[in-house]
Image (spheres, rainbow, N blue to C red):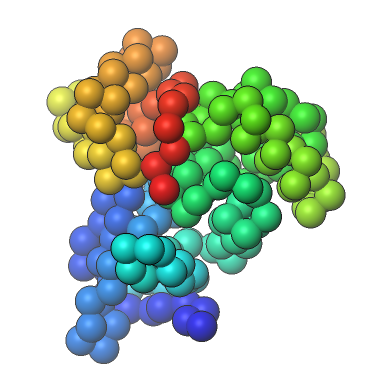
Amino acid sequence: MIGYLRGQLVRSSPAKVCLEVQGLGFELFVSLSSYQKLPPPPAEVQLFTRIQVQEKGIELYGFAGEEERALFSLLVDHVPGIGPRTALSVLGAAAPEELRGAVARGDHAWLSRIKGVGKKTAERLIVELRGRFPEVDVELGTVRQPLADDDAVGKDARLALLALGYREAEAEKAVGQARERVPSATVEELIREALRGSGGRAAR
Protein backbone atom coordinates (compact mmCIF):
# COMPACT_ATOMS: atom_id res chain seq x y z
CA MET A 1 0.00 0.00 0.00
CA ILE A 2 1.20 3.53 -0.83
CA GLY A 3 0.73 5.63 2.30
CA TYR A 4 1.60 8.97 0.75
CA LEU A 5 3.36 10.60 -2.18
CA ARG A 6 5.66 13.61 -1.92
CA GLY A 7 6.68 15.41 -5.06
CA GLN A 8 6.15 18.30 -7.46
CA LEU A 9 2.58 19.39 -8.10
CA VAL A 10 2.51 19.75 -11.88
CA ARG A 11 -1.13 20.69 -12.40
CA SER A 12 -4.30 20.73 -10.36
CA SER A 13 -8.04 21.09 -10.71
CA PRO A 14 -10.92 20.76 -8.23
CA ALA A 15 -11.22 17.08 -9.17
CA LYS A 16 -7.78 15.77 -10.21
CA VAL A 17 -4.12 16.61 -9.76
CA CYS A 18 -0.87 15.43 -11.31
CA LEU A 19 2.07 14.84 -8.98
CA GLU A 20 5.56 14.15 -10.30
CA VAL A 21 7.58 11.86 -8.05
CA GLN A 22 11.12 10.97 -9.15
CA GLY A 23 10.28 11.38 -12.81
CA LEU A 24 6.93 9.57 -12.64
CA GLY A 25 3.67 11.48 -13.06
CA PHE A 26 0.88 10.24 -10.80
CA GLU A 27 -2.68 11.33 -11.48
CA LEU A 28 -4.80 11.43 -8.33
CA PHE A 29 -8.46 12.14 -7.85
CA VAL A 30 -8.97 14.66 -5.05
CA SER A 31 -11.88 16.20 -3.20
CA LEU A 32 -12.69 19.89 -3.33
CA SER A 33 -11.56 20.12 0.28
CA SER A 34 -8.07 18.80 -0.50
CA TYR A 35 -7.80 20.91 -3.65
CA GLN A 36 -8.47 24.05 -1.63
CA LYS A 37 -5.52 23.28 0.63
CA LEU A 38 -3.00 22.82 -2.18
CA PRO A 39 -0.70 25.63 -3.30
CA PRO A 40 -0.74 26.62 -6.97
CA PRO A 41 1.62 24.56 -9.15
CA PRO A 42 4.51 24.18 -9.42
CA ALA A 43 5.02 23.40 -5.74
CA GLU A 44 6.37 20.64 -3.51
CA VAL A 45 3.46 18.87 -1.79
CA GLN A 46 2.61 15.70 0.07
CA LEU A 47 -0.65 13.83 -0.45
CA PHE A 48 -1.89 10.88 1.58
CA THR A 49 -3.16 8.22 -0.76
CA ARG A 50 -5.63 5.41 -1.20
CA ILE A 51 -5.57 2.93 -4.08
CA GLN A 52 -8.99 1.86 -5.32
CA VAL A 53 -9.40 -1.14 -7.61
CA GLN A 54 -12.32 -0.61 -10.00
CA GLU A 55 -13.73 -2.72 -12.80
CA LYS A 56 -12.25 -0.28 -15.30
CA GLY A 57 -8.83 -0.28 -13.66
CA ILE A 58 -6.84 1.01 -10.70
CA GLU A 59 -7.43 4.56 -9.51
CA LEU A 60 -5.38 6.62 -7.08
CA TYR A 61 -6.99 9.06 -4.66
CA GLY A 62 -5.12 11.81 -2.85
CA PHE A 63 -5.88 13.71 0.35
CA ALA A 64 -4.32 16.77 1.94
CA GLY A 65 -4.69 15.24 5.40
CA GLU A 66 -5.01 11.85 7.07
CA GLU A 67 -8.38 12.73 8.58
CA GLU A 68 -9.97 13.18 5.17
CA ARG A 69 -8.44 9.93 3.92
CA ALA A 70 -9.87 8.14 6.96
CA LEU A 71 -13.33 9.58 6.29
CA PHE A 72 -13.07 8.56 2.63
CA SER A 73 -12.24 5.01 3.70
CA LEU A 74 -15.15 4.97 6.16
CA LEU A 75 -17.54 6.05 3.43
CA VAL A 76 -16.30 3.60 0.80
CA ASP A 77 -15.73 0.61 3.08
CA HIS A 78 -18.67 0.87 5.48
CA VAL A 79 -21.58 2.61 3.74
CA PRO A 80 -23.44 0.49 1.16
CA GLY A 81 -24.10 2.41 -2.03
CA ILE A 82 -21.20 4.84 -1.60
CA GLY A 83 -18.52 4.52 -4.27
CA PRO A 84 -15.24 6.44 -4.50
CA ARG A 85 -16.58 9.28 -6.65
CA THR A 86 -19.64 9.72 -4.46
CA ALA A 87 -17.37 9.72 -1.43
CA LEU A 88 -15.40 12.57 -3.01
CA SER A 89 -18.68 14.41 -3.61
CA VAL A 90 -19.57 14.01 0.06
CA LEU A 91 -16.15 15.25 1.18
CA GLY A 92 -16.35 18.12 -1.31
CA ALA A 93 -19.79 19.19 -0.10
CA ALA A 94 -19.02 18.84 3.60
CA ALA A 95 -15.89 19.52 5.61
CA PRO A 96 -15.03 16.67 8.01
CA GLU A 97 -16.48 18.54 10.99
CA GLU A 98 -19.67 19.29 9.05
CA LEU A 99 -20.10 15.63 8.10
CA ARG A 100 -19.53 14.54 11.68
CA GLY A 101 -22.04 17.12 12.87
CA ALA A 102 -24.71 16.06 10.38
CA VAL A 103 -24.28 12.40 11.31
CA ALA A 104 -24.31 13.18 15.03
CA ARG A 105 -27.54 15.16 14.65
CA GLY A 106 -29.13 12.54 12.38
CA ASP A 107 -29.71 15.27 9.79
CA HIS A 108 -31.14 13.23 6.89
CA ALA A 109 -32.35 16.32 5.02
CA TRP A 110 -28.95 18.00 4.96
CA LEU A 111 -27.11 14.86 3.91
CA SER A 112 -29.61 13.98 1.17
CA ARG A 113 -28.91 17.27 -0.62
CA ILE A 114 -25.45 16.04 -1.58
CA LYS A 115 -25.14 14.60 -5.09
CA GLY A 116 -25.55 10.84 -5.08
CA VAL A 117 -26.90 10.79 -1.52
CA GLY A 118 -30.64 10.27 -1.54
CA LYS A 119 -32.84 9.64 1.47
CA LYS A 120 -31.92 5.95 1.83
CA THR A 121 -28.20 6.59 1.47
CA ALA A 122 -28.41 9.43 3.99
CA GLU A 123 -30.00 7.01 6.45
CA ARG A 124 -27.21 4.50 5.80
CA LEU A 125 -24.61 7.21 6.37
CA ILE A 126 -26.06 8.02 9.76
CA VAL A 127 -26.47 4.39 10.82
CA GLU A 128 -23.06 3.23 9.63
CA LEU A 129 -20.97 6.25 10.63
CA ARG A 130 -22.54 7.19 13.95
CA GLY A 131 -20.25 5.93 16.66
CA ARG A 132 -17.28 5.54 14.31
CA PHE A 133 -16.07 9.04 15.16
CA PRO A 134 -16.81 11.35 18.10
CA GLU A 135 -20.23 12.96 17.97
CA VAL A 136 -19.96 16.69 17.70
CA ASP A 137 -22.39 19.54 17.29
CA VAL A 138 -21.16 22.12 14.81
CA GLU A 139 -22.72 24.99 12.91
CA LEU A 140 -22.73 24.46 9.15
CA GLY A 141 -20.87 27.10 7.24
CA THR A 142 -18.28 27.80 4.57
CA VAL A 143 -15.04 29.75 4.46
CA ARG A 144 -15.10 32.60 1.98
CA GLN A 145 -12.10 32.94 -0.31
CA PRO A 146 -11.15 35.94 -2.48
CA LEU A 147 -13.54 36.49 -5.38
CA ALA A 148 -12.53 35.39 -8.85
CA ASP A 149 -13.69 36.37 -12.31
CA ASP A 150 -17.31 35.26 -12.81
CA ASP A 151 -16.86 33.60 -16.21
CA ALA A 152 -13.81 31.66 -15.03
CA VAL A 153 -15.65 30.67 -11.86
CA GLY A 154 -18.59 29.12 -13.71
CA LYS A 155 -16.37 27.38 -16.26
CA ASP A 156 -14.07 25.87 -13.63
CA ALA A 157 -17.05 24.76 -11.54
CA ARG A 158 -18.66 23.02 -14.53
CA LEU A 159 -15.40 21.28 -15.43
CA ALA A 160 -15.04 20.02 -11.88
CA LEU A 161 -18.57 18.59 -11.90
CA LEU A 162 -17.97 16.91 -15.25
CA ALA A 163 -14.83 15.29 -13.79
CA LEU A 164 -16.96 14.02 -10.90
CA GLY A 165 -19.31 12.24 -13.31
CA TYR A 166 -22.01 14.81 -14.11
CA ARG A 167 -23.43 15.01 -17.60
CA GLU A 168 -23.00 18.33 -19.40
CA ALA A 169 -26.64 19.33 -18.87
CA GLU A 170 -26.53 18.27 -15.21
CA ALA A 171 -23.39 20.28 -14.58
CA GLU A 172 -24.82 23.35 -16.30
CA LYS A 173 -28.04 23.14 -14.31
CA ALA A 174 -26.33 22.49 -10.98
CA VAL A 175 -23.90 25.39 -11.42
CA GLY A 176 -26.71 27.71 -12.55
CA GLN A 177 -28.85 26.88 -9.52
CA ALA A 178 -25.86 27.22 -7.19
CA ARG A 179 -25.08 30.63 -8.71
CA GLU A 180 -28.64 31.76 -7.97
CA ARG A 181 -28.30 30.74 -4.33
CA VAL A 182 -24.81 32.18 -3.89
CA PRO A 183 -24.32 34.90 -6.55
CA SER A 184 -20.84 36.00 -5.41
CA ALA A 185 -19.41 32.51 -4.89
CA THR A 186 -15.82 31.59 -5.66
CA VAL A 187 -15.02 28.45 -7.66
CA GLU A 188 -14.74 26.29 -4.54
CA GLU A 189 -17.92 27.71 -3.01
CA LEU A 190 -19.83 27.25 -6.26
CA ILE A 191 -18.74 23.62 -6.59
CA ARG A 192 -19.59 22.89 -2.98
CA GLU A 193 -23.02 24.55 -3.30
CA ALA A 194 -23.71 22.63 -6.54
CA LEU A 195 -22.79 19.34 -4.85
CA ARG A 196 -24.98 20.11 -1.87
CA GLY A 197 -27.96 21.19 -3.90
CA SER A 198 -28.04 18.49 -6.56
CA GLY A 199 -29.50 15.06 -6.03
CA GLY A 200 -29.70 12.35 -8.65
CA ARG A 201 -27.41 9.53 -9.60
CA ALA A 202 -24.08 8.97 -7.94
CA ALA A 203 -20.84 9.45 -9.82
CA ARG A 204 -18.84 6.34 -9.01
71 is higher (above) or lower (below) than 86: below
- Residue found farthest to the left: 151
Closer to the camera, 128 or 137?
Answer: 128
- Residue 78 vs 47, above or below: the answer is above
The residue nearer to you, when weighing 84 against 91, is 84
Query: Toward which corner of the image does residue 123 lie, by quadrant?
Result: top right
| Total labels drawn | 0
Identify which residue, 177 or 147, lies in the foreground.
177
> What residue is shown at x 74% (from left), y 38% (from top)?
126
Outermost residue to the bottom: 22
Residue 91 is situated, as x and y percent measured from the top left of the image, at: 52, 45
In this image, 98 relative to 186: left or right?
Answer: right
Farthest residue, direction top: 180
Q: Is residue 65 left or right of residue 58?
A: right
Residue 112: quadrant of the picture: top right
Q: Residue at x 28, y 18 (%)?
A: 173
Q: Is residue 96 visible?
A: yes
**Horizontal side of residue 103 vs 71, given as left or right:** right
Pinpoint residue 107: horizontal percent, then vertical percent.
72, 26
Query: What residue is drawn where x is 63% and y is 25%?
Result: 119
Image vertical order of residue 3 relative to residue 93, above or below? below
Q: Is residue 43 visible?
A: no
Give residue 13's position: percent from left, percent from top: 27, 51
Q: Position of residue 127 (x, y in %)?
A: 78, 41
